[in-house]
Amino acid sequence: MRRDFTLQTYQEFLTTALEQGYKLTSYEDYITNDYSGKKVMILRHDVDDMPHNSLDTARIQYQLGAKGSYYFRMVPQSFHPLIIEKIRDLGHEIGYHYEDMAMNDGDPDKAIKAFEENLEKFREFYPVKTICMHGSPLSKWDNRQIWEHYNYKDYGIIAEPYFDTDFTKLLYITDTGRQWNRTSSSVRDKVDTPFEFSFSNTFELMEALRNDELPDHIMQNIHPQRWNDDLLNWSQELLMQNVKNQVKRIIVKLR
């Protein structure tokens, strides 16, 4: 029986999308170009932890002629300059996975100062044009609330997925909770959309692609730390994610 959430399975998923005629590209590229009438899949990655895994997925995509967007947090378990440089040099977009409201107890003035400083650090490696909020599931603060007080476009940012993507026309699929679009294990990684797709595993998702059941425009969001070929790392991530999912289900019910 094949294991899900391995790098081998992820490569098979991308290859399936290519075989079905999807262009695999970054969020920055999608925002700045017209993909009307074309099949396109945005490859978004939230680098919450274990950045070496992100380098693995970036290399797979490079070998397939694809490019994606990698959103790094400004915390030690995510921010890794050497890996950021290597992913950039493979032709991928680098973005900021901001969590400044949660890190500053909901104070928008402190949060925007931190945002400015962190954005400049990332721009030492890449001319960052898009950003994406970190869900911070254990915090009462939604990091997007900072933009109720400030405007990210004043900082040369052209887009943030949760504000600048028309999810009525684009299918959003995420592996949050080590599942595909299972809202019970997602606190904030949700969008308003007419699409009602959810999959028990990546193999079901690939079958839907092969059967041409999905829309022409898709954003896939993965957390690369979940994808491991090594059995020990794979098992540890599975165990930890099961624990996290139980906590998230409680949080979702309470909110």
Image (spheres, rainbow, N blue to C red):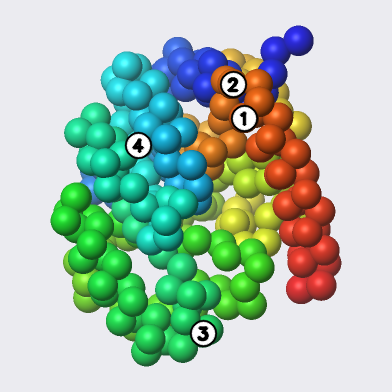
Residue where numbered disc 4 is placed: 68
Crowd tier of the residue under label 4, counting other residues whose Cα lies within 10 Å: few below 14, some 14–19, many 20 or above: many
The secondary structure type at the circle numbered 3 is loop
Residue 96 on image: x %, y %: 34, 58
Q: CA–CA distance between discs 1 and 2?
A: 6 Å
Mark sitting earlier along the chain (3/4): 4
In-image side of 85 versus 102 (left or right): left
The residues tagged by marks 2 and 4 sit, at their Cα atoms, a distance apart of 23 Å
Residue 201 found in image quarter:
top right
Q: State which tag comes first along the sequence, 3 or 1.
A: 3
Q: Residue at x 77, y 44 (%)?
A: 242
Q: Amino acid at mark 3?
A: Gly
The disc, 3 or 2, on the residue closer to the chain's N-terminal end is 3
Judging by the rendered image, the residue that carries numbered circle 1 is: 233
Which residue is at a point 58% across and 77% down the rendered structure image?
A: 141
Say what secondary structure mark 2 lies in: loop
